[in-house]
Structure formats: C-alpha cells, structure tokens
Amino acid sequence: MAFTNDPIPLDRVPRLSDDAFVPVDRRYLRVRLTGTAITAVVVVIVAFVASIWIDGSVAAGLGVLLVAVLAGSAIVAAVEVRRLAYQLRDHDVSLRNGVITHRTQTLPFSRVQHVNLTRGPVERAVGLASLEITSAGPNISIPGLALAEAERIKQLVSEYSHVDVHRDA
Amino acid sequence: MIDLAEPQRQSPLAILFFGLKLVRRIGIVQVGVGLLFLWNTLLAGSLTLLVLLTGAALSAFGGVSWWRSTFQVVDGELVVRSGVVRADRLTVPLDRIQSISIEQEPLHRVVGLVKVSVDSAGSDGAEFEIAAVTREVAEALERAAVTDAPRPSPVPSVIAPARVDGPESEPDEVVFTHGWRRLVRTALTTWPLSGLVLLAPLFAFGDEIGDFLFGEPIDGLVRSVPLRGVPLLLAACILVAVALNVVRILLTDWALTLRATSARVQRTSGLLSRTSRASSVERIQMVSSRQNLLQRRAGLYSVTLSTIGHGDLDLNGCSGTELDDIRRRVRVAAHSPHRDDRRVDPATAWPAVCTAIVVVAAFVVGLWFAVGPWALLATGLIAPSWAAARRAVSNQRWSIGDELASERRLLSTDLDQALVFKANAVVVTQTIFERRRALARIRLVTAAGSIEIGMIPLDEAQAVRDVILVAASTDRRPWM
C-alpha cells in the first residue's frame, strides 16, 4: 500500500462542543452553601466573643462586613454551580468551571493515572460524590455528582483509560 | 559485569557517609559544641562511658542497617529492602523511574565511590538514595532503569509503536564538552548575582569577619564610605559578583559534558562534586532555551530539558549548533516560531500596564508621606512599563505543529517547546477582560511544566485545543 501523509483539514478535527456539557447535580449548591453557612456561624460567634474585649461596635462592624463577604461568596457559589459542568467523550474528559474566569480543562483518557471517588459528610448527607481523576500532570475534580452517576463515570473512565480504581469514602 | 538480579549492597564505607549525613542534619556547629562539651566533661570522666557506649551502639546499628539494606532488579522492578527492627520493602517499576543522578562529592572521590539518587514520578524528592556505591554498580543501575527499561505504550495500538530505544550495546556519544574557556564565557554572560551566594556567610558572620580583618564591623565600614564613593563601591560589588559567578560556574559546570544515545541523554559536570544526571529521551517533556543580551552577543544559550520528577537537565552556555543538536536528539523542531508569525492580541499588554499603574499608585501613596509631591516622579515609570509591555507583546510569537512553541523576546529571548502528543491536559481560560474581546488563553500542561499562549481569538484557542487532544489520544509514540 502506498504511504500517504496528507494534511488533515482542521474542520475534520472533532470539536469540543460547548452544548454537550452536562451540568452537575443542583444539590451540590446545598453542599457549597452549607460550607459558607458554617463559616458564617463561626464568624458571628468569633465577633460576639471579640466584642467582650474590644469595642462592641467595631466587632459588630467587622462581623457584618465578613458576613456580607460570605453572602457575596454564596451568590458567587450559586452562579458557579450553574456553570459547573463536565463532558465525557471517547478519548477525554472535560470540566467547565469558573465565574470570573471561565475555564475549560480537558484530560485525555490516555494520560489518566488513577480515579478516586470521594464523599465528604455533607455530600453523603445529600447523596452526592466527587470524582477525582489524576494524571502525571494536573488533576480534574468533578464535584456534585449523584452517587450512582459518579460510580458509573468512574467505571467508564477507568475502562477507557485502563487504570485501577480507588475509593475513599 | 554487575548482575543486578542479585541483591547488591552499598560499600561498607556508606556507614561513614551515613554518619556525615547525620552530622550535617544535626548541624556541624551543634555537633562541634557538643563535642567541646564532652571533651571538657571527659576529664571528670562522668560521660565517657555513656559516650563510648552510644558511639558503639550507633556504629553497630549502622553496621546492621548497612547489612540489611539491599537493592536488586527483579522482573522489571527495582526492589529496595531496608530496616533493622522492621523489614521495609520498596518496589519501584523500572518504567516509573524518571531519572537517576550519579554524584561524586569530594569525599566520594577520595574513596572512589559515587552517590546515586533515584527519582520516580509521584515522589516529591528522590525516591531513595544510595549513599556510597561503586561506579560500576551505579552505571549498571542507570542502564537498567533509564536505557533498558520497558516503556509502556500510551494507548492500545494497532500498529506497534516505533521502537526508539537503541540496542543495549549502543555506546554513548559525546555531544559536547565545555572547556574552561567556554565556562568563563558562560559565567561572564549570565546574571552575576547568583555568584553572591558564595558570600552568604558574610550575612551571618559579617561583623566578626570585619572585626578580624579591619578591626571594625563591616556595617560601620559601609556607613563610613562618603557619598561620592558609592559608584565606586557599586562597581566593586559588581566586579566581585562577576568574579564569584565565574568561580561558581567553574565549580558546578566544570567539564560539562552531554552524552547521548538514541534513547537517552546524560549530563555530567562538577569540579569538587561530580554530578551525573540521565534521562530517557521519552521522559523529556519540554525544551526551553533562554538568551539574554550578553548571551546573544556571545551566541550562547541556557537550555533546560524538563523531565518528569525532579531531574531537569540544565545546560548552560550552549552554542546555537549545540542547541540544534540537543533539539534533534529529543525530537523537537529546531526552527523558531517566528517562521509561522502567529502573534498574540495587542490587548495582552493591557493587564501588564494596569498592574504597573496599580503598583506605581501604591508606591506614590507610600512615598508621599516621606518625600511629599516628589513621590509623583514615580508615575514616570508607567510610560516605560507600558512601552515595554507593548514591545514584549509585539515580539511574542507562537506556533503549533508537532509541537507547541512560544517565544517571548524583550531584553532576553525565551523559547519553550513541547511536543503536543505529550499533553497531560489542555486548559482554555477566559477572564472577563478576555470575554469582552472574544479572546482566550490556552495552556498545554505536560507532566513536567506547561506552555501558555494568550491572548488569542477564542476560536483559534479552541481549534488548537482540539488539535492537541487529537494528537494526545492518537499518537502512539511513548510519552514517558
């Protein structure tokens, strides 16, 4: 057979479509807001205790400021969860995230070293899990997956990338 | 011929090196103070027995530890056994070993031994060290791990990957050796401040040294210099820094030699401490070359071959021909991205200018309290930084082909190249600033560094990402 090495037209290169991203489970927002709420409670308690030693109005002002910052971060979290999405293709996995800076990270299956499934206490309470896909370079962590879906993706990624599967739950 | 299938032990002198390492870890000063204390108390005889017993116990422990520490190669794995009370066994597949460093410190040279550090992917430092072993054993281990190790195929392939490893008996070819003249040129053309590290003890013992040499602390001497003497003092400092840099380069890069086969490269250098570092060609992820103004005049380059783990190969003072030869051996194109003439968007300069404005504004506010309206003179820095940013952006070029290359040129020329099929991930990012202009940045991340191109049109960034992903998933050449 004659050897050929023709250039590949760029339009024949498969595109990573923005439309094919699958959003994470909306319950993940509860996980994020729970973390923010716990921080807010701690801040309020610290401000209350601090008001015993320092001027009460200063402590209250700082407390209000910090709670306002936390409220802002809660709003950002809500927007971020809406943007958080993943996409699986035959040869790679992609994660789309970020509010101020939009980021799309793609990791080819041929570079995957191992796959972890992790579940924190809040995630367990709402029935979610996070999938961590590690390579010799960067890692991808897809949070906010329903447990069954996470198990299925973990299996799929490990099959496509021929790696061992770990679970730290 | 060394048979690594049999358990190998370090030289018995390794016990001595363990002891020295222990002393270094505790601190030479602390050990000295402790010995002085013991010497003074020896006369009283109170601690003599305790010291002797402790010394004997440590020696016995070191002896048993040496006897029980072995390493061997079994079924493509390096097996290291150690431990006196409990038996530790470390197994590292040979194809996971990223690099092996063979180092000969002055004391090693006296006894004709070498130190070996084995570095694998996933470890923060060296996976393990062999303190003292014969060069024959070290080189046998290096051959087994770097040259002869089986390489995993990155994807299940229909067509077998082209075997790039040379035959086992392929001799090393000396690519280049730098003599003392080249080293002096290298030192004279590189930034001399690093030579000042040799003066580091002055920071700790400056006053004592000043007292000893001049009869007063160095701080006092510096303060007594009249204002007109400041340029002279600066010139003297620069001369000292340059001279010390020459000494530093001569010490660290003495007889810098690059050897290569078709499968691996090995860098050896050093006057007091002879260091050898080798890596297979496949594990080299990126090639970076730097050239400052002086180096450009002298036609020299600083080259770094980034490998997985902590075994980067730094080759200072390479000529253009040597750089091309290195690129050819690690299978990276020799041409500059200037040929393709792909540029980044001029808006790339804006974030740099904005940063400069913010920094200068903070500087002005800070200085206002000290010098009043004179602080406004600092705003004069904004225009040069704006011009520099614009110049840097207009000189920046990138190219995508078999490798992704990025070249930045201002006072120095920096060129980074990475074969696209070695990508471990590709990231496309867009800040608010970039979104408003439909621009984006693309970052190719390898297992040993990354290259970022930006800002470029979003469509172009996405197309480059798609090309990289196709190469990473379909190219059957081994990537590590």
Image (cartoon, coloured by chain):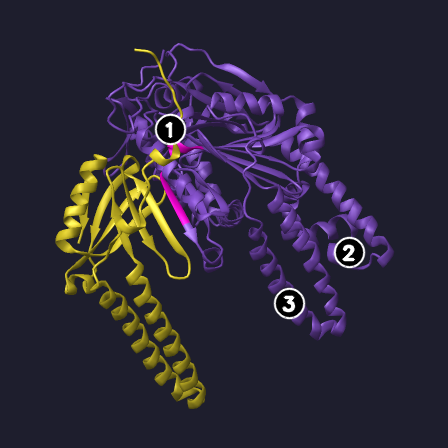
Chain colours: A yellow, B purple
* Residue A114: x %, y % from top left: 24, 41
- Distance, label 3 to label 2, CA atoms, is 33 Å
Nearest to the eye among marks 1 and 2: give it: 1
Q: Which amino acid, by three-letter code, is at mark 2? A: Val
Label 2 crowd bin: few (<14), some (14–19), many (20+), radius 10 Å: few
- Distance, label 1 to label 2, CA atoms, is 68 Å
**Residue behind mark 2:** B222
Q: Which residues are magenta?
A: B419-428
Nearest to the eye among marks 1 and 3: give it: 1
* Residue B382: x %, y % from top left: 68, 59
| Residue drawn at the location 71% of the way across and 49% of the way down | B209
Please, is residue A44 above or below residue B195 in the view?
A: below
**Residue behind mark 3:** B361
**Mark 3: secondary structure:** helix
**Residue behind mark 1:** A8
Q: Is residue B382 left or right of residue A131?
A: right
**Mark 1: secondary structure:** loop
Q: Chain of mark 1?
A: A
Residue B344 visible from this viewpoint: yes
Residue nearest the viewer, comparing B343 with B5: B343
